Image: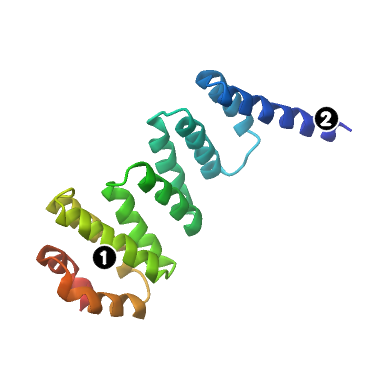
């Protein structure tokens, strides 16, 4: 009986949280959420929900919460959850080089060539349009190279690079050259 009552109280608290969010009462909603979050064991998920609440309320603080959640998901090798968060961050900030760089690594790790190609093309496009500078591009590519050096050979990735090699800007080729050997 006590367990049922505890579940009912938590359900009511989640309903109250939803009501506060709908009414735009940010501080009250965050206070209720922080109390409720103690009943959740998945810290990355807690950060993700907090990011969702802040995002719904148009707070730029949501980006930091999402980044923290994505970091924890990656640390726990929960690639799909990390990808979902990074894709959401990219939707929020379409020119975000950091999200693109992390997505390249994640798509390579999960062997998803189509999405890898899409995000790599986006990275090169942003560079060609001068949205990203050489330093940002090099940082993104270095993150990819560093992450993949610890991985087993991925034949699809080597084939992909061989197919696009000629069309890449010289700075991209220079950064990727050690990896392509």
Badge 2 vs badge 1, beta-carbon distance below 8 Å: no
Look at 25% across and 75% down and name the residue there. 161
Location of residue 178 in the rendering, given as x and y in whole percent from the top left corner:
18, 72
Mark 2–mark 1 distance (CA, rounded to whole Å): 53 Å
Q: Is residue 144 left or right of residue 41?
A: left
Front in this rendered view, residue 19 or 77: 19
Residue 99's disc number: none
Per the image, label 2 sits on a secondary structure element best described as helix
Please tell me which residue is depicted at 60% across the width and 33% down the height of the picture: 37
172 shown above or below 27:
below
Quarter the N terminus occupies: top right
> Where's residue 143, x and y in %?
27, 58
Vertical position of residue 174 compared to residue 136: above or below: below
The C terminus: image quadrant: bottom left
In this rendering, position of residue 146 left or right of residue 76: left
Label 1: how many Cα within 10 Å (few below 14, some 14–19, many 20+): some
Residue 145 — which label? 1
**Residue 5 bears which disc, if any?**
2
Of the pair 66 and 130, the residue shown nearer to us: 130
Q: Secondary structure at mark 1?
A: helix
Residue 55 visible, this orientation:
yes
Report whether residue 177 is seen. Answer: no
Q: Mark 2 vs mark 1: which is more N-terminal?
A: 2
Q: Position of residue 81 (x, y in %)?
A: 50, 53
Color scheme of the displayed model: rainbow
Q: Residue at x 37, y 41 (%)?
A: 92
Instruction: Identify the residue shown where x is 58% and y is 28%.
Output: 33
Furthest residue to the right?
1
């Amino acid at each position: 009986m006590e367990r049922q009552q505890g579940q009912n109280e938590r359900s009511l608290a989640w309903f109250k949280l939803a009501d506060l969010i709908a009414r735009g009462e940010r501080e009250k909603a965050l206070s209720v959420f922080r109390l409720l979050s103690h009943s959740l064991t998945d810290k990355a998920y807690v950060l993700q929900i907090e990011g969702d609440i802040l995002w719904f309320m148009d707070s730029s603080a949501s980006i930091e919460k999402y980044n923290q959640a994505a970091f924890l998901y990656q640390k726990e090798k929960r690639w799909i959850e990390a990808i979902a968060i990074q894709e959401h961050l990219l939707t929020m900030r379409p020119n975000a080089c950091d999200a693109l760089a992390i997505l390249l690594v994640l798509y390579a790790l999960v062997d998803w060539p189509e999405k890898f190609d899409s995000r790599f093309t986006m990275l090169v496009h942003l560079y060609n349009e001068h949205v990203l500078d050489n330093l940002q591009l090099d940082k993104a590519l270095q993150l990819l190279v560093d992450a993949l050096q610890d991985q087993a050979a991925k034949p699809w990735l080597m084939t992909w690079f061989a197919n696009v090699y000629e069309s890449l800007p010289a700075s991209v080729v220079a950064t990727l050259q050690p990896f392509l050997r």
